[in-house]
Amino acid sequence: MKALLQSLLMAAWCSSVWASAEEIPARIAQERERLQREREAIEQDHAARMRECWQRFAVNACLQEVRRSRHAALDPLRAQELELNAQERAWRTQQRDERLREKQEVQERRP
């Protein structure tokens, strides 16, 4: 019941935010690309900071701090990806339900 309510709310949200069903996959793809670019920037920064750590005397402490900051930077991106995945699932569910409804209507019209 909770999952059904959640999917209905997500579908309603998707339809209110995005004007048409054709725009939804394009916007999801754009968001995924943006998240990927942000992830790549974080990873590049992480790699550069890791190289800097190897130049210091206290390498392990530096490496730990760099890992912590990397995880802290990636956590919000992961949350956004999970939200995006939920939106995509809701959109796909909505599309599937529409196809099934249309198929049922066609079968009901047949004698």
Image (cartoon, rainbow, N blue to C red):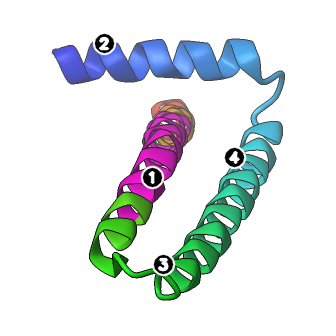
Q: CA distance from mark 3 to mark 2?
A: 49 Å
The magenta region covers 67-91
Place of residue 90 in the rendered image (x, y in percent of width and height, measured from the top left) = 47, 34
The three-letter code of the residue at mark 4 reads Ile
| Three-letter code, disc 1 | Ser
Query: First in sequence: mark 3 or mark 2?
Result: 2
Residue drawn where x is 34% and y is 18% of the image:
6
- Image marks 3 and 2: residues in contact by CB distance under 8 Å: no
Q: Amino acid at mark 3?
A: Cys
Q: Position of residue 105 (x, y in %)?
A: 53, 30
Q: Position of residue 56 (x, y in %)?
A: 47, 80
Q: Is residue 5 left or right of residue 19?
A: left
User: Which residue is tagged 4?
Assistant: 28
- SS assignment for the magenta stretch, majority: helix
Q: Which mark is residue 93?
A: none
Name the quadrant containing residue 98.
top right
Q: Which residue is mark 2?
A: 5
